[in-house]
Amino acid sequence: MPVIDHRRRRLGIAAGTALLTLTVAGCSGLGRTAVGPVIYTTERDAVVLVNSPSVKGCHRLAPAGAKEVVNETLIDIILYRTRDCTGPGTTYLATTLSDVNAASALPWRSFSTVH
C-alpha cells in the first residue's frame, strides 16, 4: 500500500472521529439538569423539593408562591415574582445559597437557571 493511501486513511479516520465527537457533544446538552435540589417554603410553611430541574425553560413554584428558597444545585438560579419568569423584581440566587422574603414582599412564583 503506498504511503499516500495510508495517510489518507489516517486523515479520514481522524476527521470521522472529530465529527463524531462534535455530534455527541452537541446532543449531550439536550437533557441537562441542574444537579441537586431547589427547596422552597410556601406561605403555609409547606416545604417543596424540586430535584435536579432542567436547565432550560421556566419552572413554576406552588400557586401561592414561595417565601424562602434554597438553591442546592450546582448552578445559579433567578427567582421571579411572576408565574412566567418575566418582569421586574427578580432575585439572583447563587448555588448553595438561600434567600428569605420580607413579610411585606410578594412571593416568588417561578425560577429559571443561569447557564
Image (cartoon, rainbow, N blue to C red):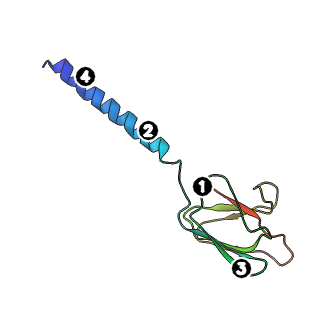
Q: CA distance from mark 1 to mark 3?
A: 25 Å
Amino acid type, mark 1? Val
Identify residue for label 4: 8
Camera-side mark, 2 or 4: 2
Please, what secondary structure does the residue beneath circle 1 have?
loop
Amino acid under disc 3: Ala
Q: Which residue position is annotated with label 3?
A: 46
Mark 2 vs 3, N-terminal side: 2
Q: Residue at x 80, y 63 (%)?
A: 81
Q: Mark 3 packing: few (<14 Cα in 10 Å), some, or many (20+)?
A: few
What residue is drawn where x is 74% and y is 81%? 45
Residue hosting label 1: 55
Is label 2 in contact with label 4 (beta carbons under 8 Å)?
no
- In primary-sequence order, the first of circles 4 and 1 is 4
The numbered dot on residue 23 is 2
As rendered, which of 89 and 49 lies closer to the eye?
Answer: 49
Q: CA distance from mark 1 to mark 2?
A: 20 Å
Q: Nearer the viewer, mark 3 or mark 4?
A: 3
